[in-house]
Image: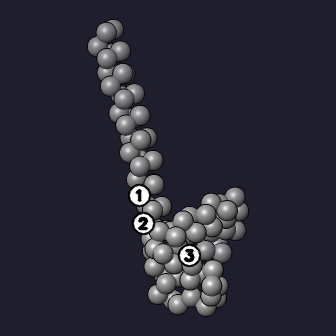
């Protein structure tokens, strides 16, 4: 994660928010608060990271789908314009 943060420094807060959101969804937020990140097991931290990746993939797929729909819509408009000429 540290390399990612060096490349996209603005993403740090967003990734931290996502991490906290996922930890809460997995009911691990209380454990983190009580024990701290440094005392979490590899399994717990990995579970949070894995769910973060799944959420980011879903988000990216939605973005690509939206762009695809916009592109498809533009192509349909171009076809209509060509047919009108």
Q: Nearer the viewer, residue 4 or 26?
A: 26
Give residue 69's quadrant in the image: top left
Report the residue at 70% width, 68% height from top.
Answer: 6
Percent position (x, y) of residue 3? 64, 73
Q: Please say whether residue 85 is visible from this viewpoint.
A: yes
Is 30 situated left or right of 82 in this image?
Answer: right
Mark whose residue sits in front, 1 or 3: 3
Report the residue at 31% width, 9% height from top.
Answer: 84
For disc 1, the marked residue is 58
Q: Earlier in the sequence, mark 1 or mark 3?
A: 3
Mark whose residue sits in front, 3 or 2: 3
Q: Which mark is residue 54?
A: 2
Percent position (x, y) of residue 14? 62, 60
Q: Please say whether residue 48 is visible from this viewpoint.
A: no
For disc 3, the marked residue is 29
Percent position (x, y) of residue 31? 56, 83
Q: Residues within 10 Å of mark 2 (few under 14, many from 20)?
A: few
Report the residue at 47% width, 68% height from top.
Answer: 25
Considering every residue shown, the one lying at the far left of the view is 83
Report the residue at 62% width, 88% height from top.
Answer: 35
Give residue 15's quadrant in the image: bottom right
């Amino acid at each position: 994660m540290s390399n990612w943060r060096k490349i996209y420094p603005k993403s740090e807060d967003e990734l931290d928010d996502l991490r906290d959101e996922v930890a809460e969804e997995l009911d691990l937020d209380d454990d983190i608060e009580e024990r701290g990140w440094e005392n979490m097991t590899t399994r717990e931290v990995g579970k949070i990271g894995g769910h973060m990746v799944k959420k980011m993939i879903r988000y990216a797929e939605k973005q690509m789908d939206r762009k695809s729909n916009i592109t498809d819509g533009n192509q349909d408009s171009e076809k209509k314009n060509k047919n009108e000429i």
